[in-house]
Each structure stands twice: as C-alpha cells, then as structure tokens.
Amino acid sequence: MPQHQQHHEGHTHEHGPGCGHTAIRHEGHVDYVHDGHLHHPHGQDAVEHTIAVSDANPDRCTPEQECEDGGGAMAAHAQETVPHGDHVDHIHKGRLHHHHGDHCDDHGPVEIVEPS
C-alpha cells in the first residue's frame, strides 16, 4: 500500500508522459518527481507518495559505497531528491543514495520510466 503524505487539491501541473518530470515506477504505478516530492496523478490533483523502507529499498548504512566525487558531496552527482521513509534520498543512476558523512548510503534501486 503506498504511503501517502498529503493530497494536493487543485495541483496546477498535470503529470503524465511528456510532462518534463522524471517518472518512476512505484508500487505498481507511475509517480512523478516534482520539486523533491513524489506525485501520483489523481484526477486534477496529485497525491504525494513516499518510497517505503523495504527489503528492496532499505534504510541502512553502506560505508563501502563512496560518492563518485570522492568527497561525499551529493550535489556533484545526484539527479533529483525523493522522499524515502522518514528522510530524503537522491536518485543517482537508478539508485537511491543518501549522503551520510563521508560516503553515500545505497538505499536500493528505483525504476525510472522512459518518457513516451
């Protein structure tokens, strides 16, 4: 069951293929990354979803996972941010990364859907 944070009534942007936002497959449907939120279209509104902490997307420390820039700075290689459990992760090359001290924790894969 998707974790819902809040319902956006009168959401001014219509999400869908070609809307310009990154689309990810999430719990059997497609959600859109929009300003650090994960939006699921619901009529003319949007519902905020959160990627649940699970076996596929754990919330664990992986100190062996170095940031690609070698210095721990997420901004240098992160694409976008999405809510994951009770924190925010960055999408990088189809995976959730979480900046943690001098490394990036790997919180598992996300399936980016190609725009159509």
Image (spheres, grey):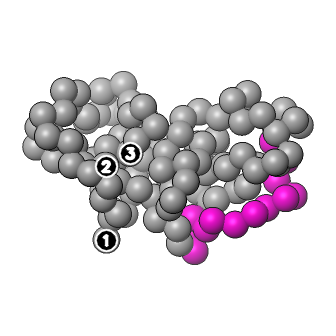
Verify whether residue 73 appears in magenta. no
Is 108 situated left or right of 25 in this image? right
Q: Earlier in the sequence, mark 3 or mark 2?
A: 3
The picture places residue 85, in percent across and down from the top left corner, at 50, 61
* Element assignment for label 3: strand
Q: In this figure, which residue is indicated by the disc labeled 3? A: 38
Label 1 and label 2: CA atoms lie apart by 13 Å
Residue at horizontal 82 percent and vertical 39 percent from the top: 72
**Callout 1 crowding tier (Cα within 10 Å): few <14, some 14–19, many ≥20:** few
Residue 48, which numbered label?
Answer: 2
**Callout 2 crowding tier (Cα within 10 Å): few <14, some 14–19, many ≥20:** many
Magenta residues? 55-67
- Of all residues, the one furthest to the bottom in this rendering is 55
Residue 28, which numbered label?
Answer: none
Q: Is residue 53 visible?
A: yes
Verify whether residue 58 appears in magenta. yes
Amino acid at dot 3:
Leu
Q: In this figure, which residue is indicated by the disc labeled 1? A: 1
